Image: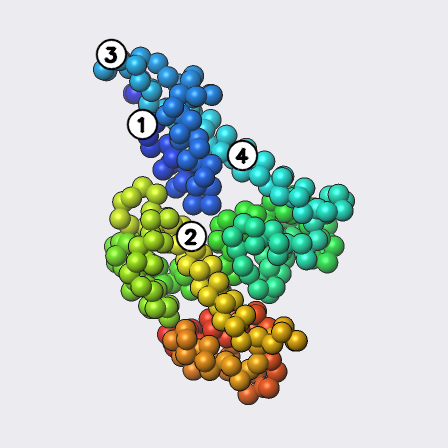
Amino acid sequence: ESKPQPELPPSHLTELLLRFFGPLVADAARSLGKELNAGSGKAKETKERSAHSGREGLQALTFPQVLVWARRLREMEFSGYREKFKKYDTSSSGILQVEDLRGLFHELGYWMPQSTIDEFVMEALEEQREDGCKKTVDAKAGLDYDAFVSLMMLLRRREGFSKREYAEMKAAFDRFDDASDNRIEAVELGDILRYLGHHPKLEEVQCLVIQVDFDQSGDLNFREFLRLMRLHREVELELIRKEFEHYKSEDSGTMPRASLPKVLAHFQCGPLSKHVENVPEADDTADLGLEDLVAIVEGSRTAKVA
């Protein structure tokens, strides 16, 4: 006698898809979950009379049926990639230029310095070569669609953080993962953010948790934590942008370095570190661009934590 296959309640489909694909597909996962539970579209194939209750209901999903829904989500994801590639391939050449990526990333909710964009591009091109592609790794030549997909997968995996930033996030998460079960309690997030040099208000932390704790479990796995940190990063960057706009010169479009102490004090940062990468030396008189200011503020926080 064969053993019965494990089954998944329809109401758990969204959570399963999110745990496998990650928070970036939240909208698509919710859409499929609603479709299943509403019995519309392809979901009608799974709707039948429940043998246990004797009433109309949605049958629990077997593993092969779950795979069908996962495949649909992957198709939706790649369809989105194709649309984005076509939109930003303004020359219709089948090649996306690196300088066009900043607008794409901004549309996706990511602000990244050029150094991080370049890092992602080179990683994507290296992956293509490792997969058997014989093309020379040359970021100046742009990305074809396959390299673009690799880029998007990397972006999703690390939520737009550089390798160094990702490692710092993982180290902070592991520090507070007392049970070593890849989960932290949401109530610990304030402590983690302070450990990373931030000063969040309780309501700000609660707002972030609501956006990523999809199963309302009260705790977060690392992928959910990483998504939360990306959302927090975007809020912080908007605040830095506002400070930059307040102090910048209309003529040069840059911020006088003399204004830097006021900005650092505003963000409760530590003293300016002389080891901030890609930024003019601390005793330099050069004015600052937005990327310079972002690197200094974040580098000063790191110096304060260290």
Q: Tell me the CA gap for discs 4 and 3.
A: 35 Å
Which residue shows up at 44% across the image and 64% down it? 236
Residue nearest the observer in this picture, 91 or 240: 240
In the figure, residue 271 lies in which quadrant?
bottom left
Residue with the mark numbered 3: 54
Cβ–Cβ under 8 Å for marks 2 and 1: no
Residue at disc 2, secondary structure: helix
Q: Amino acid at mark 4?
A: Met
Residue nearest the observer in this picture, 152 or 89: 89
Cβ–Cβ under 8 Å for marks 4 and 2: no
Q: Is residue 305 left or right of residue 294?
A: left
Cβ–Cβ under 8 Å for marks 3 and 2: no
Residue at disc 4, secondary structure: helix
Residue with the mark numbered 2: 227
Q: Amino acid at mark 1?
A: Pro
Is disc 1 surrounded by few (<14), some (14 to 19) or many (20+) residues within 10 Å? few
Q: Position of residue 225 (x, y in %)?
A: 37, 54
**Residue 288 appears in the picture as rendered:** no
Q: Is residue 119 left or right of residue 33?
A: right
Is disc 3 surrounded by few (<14), some (14 to 19) or many (20+) residues within 10 Å? few
Can you name the residue that lies furthest to the left here? 53
Sequence-wise first label, 4 or 2: 4
Residue at disc 1, secondary structure: loop
